Image (cartoon, rainbow, N blue to C red):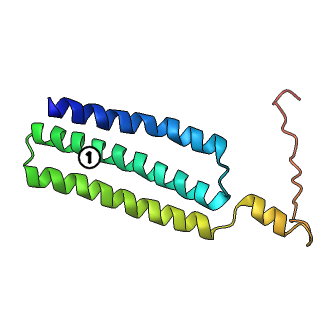
């Protein structure tokens, strides 16, 4: 009976957090920094839960496919590590490389971008 009450309490606490968050958002205005921090925390919690669930199912699938427990953990951990490296490299590249909008915005007071006019020759269709 204690397990049922504990599960009910945990379920009530997790589902009522959305209602409490809504009430706080409606009646207590937050500045940008605490609001951004709470959204970042919520997004991190959701991504963490999803990653743990995917890692568990991936490891179970590898175990059923005949891999040992150690190798299935290595494959899942390697996948997470590779994903983290790819994310960090892509994020660094996007942060350092200017976008087309930035290039056009910062060059608007300078000379225009070079334009090349191409003159194509007319092709004959063979019936002259």
Q: Foreground residue, 10 or 98?
A: 10
* 107 on left or right of 95: right
Residue 82 point in image, percent of width and height: 34, 59
Q: Foreground residue, 41 or 71?
A: 41
Which corner quadrant holds the C terminus?
top right
> In this figure, which residue is indicated by the disc labeled 1?
55
Residue 56 point in image, percent of width and height: 22, 43
Q: Which residue sits at x=86%, y=65%?
A: 113
* 42 on left or right of 83: right
Which corner quadrant holds the N terminus?
top left
Q: Which residue sits at x=89%, y=66%?
A: 108
Residue 19 point in image, percent of width and height: 51, 35
Q: Quadrant of residue 11?
A: top left
Q: Which residue sits at x=61%, y=70%?
A: 96
Q: Which residue sits at x=91%, y=66%?
A: 112
Q: Foreground residue, 30 or 43?
A: 30
**Secondary structure type for disc 1:** helix
> Looking at the picture, does residue 53 appear above or below residue 107?
above
Q: Foreground residue, 89 or 5?
A: 5
> Looking at the picture, does residue 128 appear above or below residue 95?
above
């Amino acid at each position: 009976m204690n397990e049922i009450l504990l599960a009910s309490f945990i379920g009530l606490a997790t589902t009522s957090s959305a209602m409490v968050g809504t009430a706080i958002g409606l009646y207590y205005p937050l500045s940008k920094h605490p609001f951004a921090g709470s959204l970042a925390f919520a997004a991190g919690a959701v991504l963490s839960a999803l990653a743990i669930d995917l890692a568990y199912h991936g490891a179970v699938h590898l175990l059923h496919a005949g891999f040992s427990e150690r190798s299935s953990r290595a494959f899942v951990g390697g996948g997470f590590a590779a994903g983290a490296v790819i994310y960090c490299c892509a994020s660094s590249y996007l942060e350092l490389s200017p976008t087309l909008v930035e290039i056009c915005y910062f060059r608007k007071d300078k000379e225009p971008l070079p334009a090349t006019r191409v003159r194509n020759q007319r092709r004959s269709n063979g019936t002259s």
